[in-house]
Amino acid sequence: MVDSRTKAPRPDPDPIDAAAQVLSRAGVRAAQRVCVALSGGLDSVVLLDLMQRLQERFGYVLSAAHVHHGISPNADAWSEFCADLCARRGIGFHALAVTVPECADEGFEAAARKLRHGVLRRLPADWLAYGHHREDQAETLLFRLLRGCGVRGAAAMAAYETGAPGRLRPLLAVPRNAIRACAHARGLEWIEDESNLDRKHARNWLRHEILPRIETSFPGAARTLGRAAALFRETEGLLEDLARIDRAACGGDSLSRVALLGLPEARLRNLLRHEIARAGAESPSHEHLSEVVRQLTQIGGRPLRFRLGRLACCVYRDRFWLEPFEIRSVQPVRWAGEAQLCWGDGTVRFESQNGSGVATDRLMGQPVSLVPRWPGLAMRVHADRPTRTFKNLCQEAGVPEWLRDRLPVLQVGTEAVWIGGIGLAADWACPVGAGGMLPRWMPGGARVDQ
């Protein structure tokens, strides 16, 4: 009797067929610019060869880019090898260079990788193509799991990612031995990076010591780990959908602190991860996210600003938002009737209102600008109360000191007629039934209704 649990292993995909499938799924079109990240090693040389062979079928414009890190004594030779390879094949070539700081916080290898990806993203390309293969995927998953990653990290690498530019990994389902066989069959030459053999680096140790042992005891482990990463990616997609639902329920761009704290803590952390990703920052650890939750829970109605990596978490008037920790200085900007103007890392919206806001007829024929506060700034907010200094107004409105230099001031001629977070000048208020314009300030996307 045949054991029904025993299955013949599936044949490995042919590299060119696997690459074509990824390009088709990604929607790579004619005339799009595809740039291969070319290190000169086996994987990227085979990828360049495959992409050139597929060029006629898909109609894209192909180029390659090599990043010179200046780390290896052979770096100049590698750059020359890549330039020569592209010249012989008639492929456009970009020679790039980065300098990796010796004291990088995230480690030398990680810093080099970040710089490399950063400089490649600035190329004039619609897609960047990388030579990652099946074992790279397994290695990435193991490495991240050992560092305690969550679902997003365990999703590892995708075969393609849309963006500007998008990312392609046409060989992600292909094992390294098939790539090597393809290189020999095509008579390709490549270089060997000696640093790939240095086992003091965690990734190299996993690659050379651990993965081969796992494969010995669990044949096909790399394929299985790749399948697990795909399942994690599917789960990550569901968590993203849930975060978008919770984001809308909590106010969209302007998140209510009370609504956030009404979520179960796991969903709150999921939404925070989503917001951090939208801000373009790396996902923080579970401990850091838990600290954000603790701060949100304990502050009550007080304003708050605290650091989270390169971002700052801000709470003001029950509104939560993220912004760069290092704030850009605000500069005066003229208003000529636009629906909104950028102001620092936020915006000021101008809404037409009947009987509310600034009387629009008084704005005619005068220069109107958004400006930062100036020395001696004062304004009368209530008709039955005296004029107050900017400091007094901020104290009465509960505006924290860290926010005051960024408050937008609507200046008409030489007068302050509205201050974000504080309100309108009483003398400029729109009469009942007349046309008005109501400014609304949104620092970092959070709406402030005064």
Image (spheres, rainbow, N blue to C red):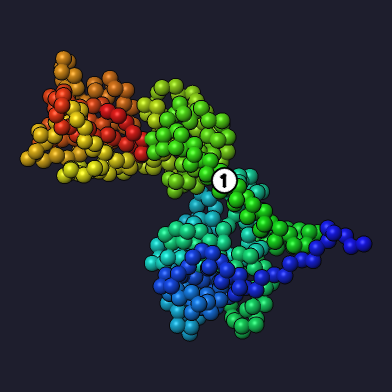
Residue 9 falls in which quadrant of the image?
bottom right
Residue 191 visible? The answer is no
Element under disc 1: helix
Q: Which residue is mark 1?
A: 238
User: In the rendered view, does 65 fall on the left or right side of 410?
Assistant: right
Q: Extreme left residue here? A: 365
- Quadrant where the N terminus sits is bottom right
Q: Name the spot of residue 172 as percent of width and height, x first.
A: 61, 64
Label 1 crowding class (10 Å Cα cut-off): few <14, some 14-19, many 20+? few
Q: Residue at x 14, y 39 (%)?
A: 368
- Quadrant where the C terminus sits is top left
**The residue under label 1 is which amino acid type?**
Leu
Q: Nearer the viewer, residue 168 or 430?
A: 430
Q: Residue at x 61, y 73 (%)?
A: 17
Q: Nearer the viewer, residue 116 or 20?
A: 20
Q: Extreme top residue here? A: 384
Q: Name the spot of residue 70 as percent of width and height, x first.
A: 48, 66
How many numbered discs, if any?
1
Q: Nearer the viewer, residue 263 or 116?
A: 263
Q: Name the spot of residue 409 as percent of width and height, x first.
A: 21, 34
Residue 41 falls in which quadrant of the image?
bottom right
User: Can you say whether 350 is above or below 295 in the image?
Assistant: below
Q: Name the spot of residue 200 as percent of width and height, x first.
A: 65, 58
User: Can you say whether 162 is above or below 63 in the image?
Assistant: above
Residue 44 falls in which quadrant of the image?
bottom right
User: Can you say whether 95 is above or below 137 in the image?
Assistant: below
Q: Extreme front residue here? A: 433
Q: Residue at x 67, y 57 (%)?
A: 227
User: Can you say whether 396 is above or below 116 in the image?
Assistant: above
Q: Residue at x 11, y 40 (%)?
A: 367
Residue 111 visible? The answer is yes
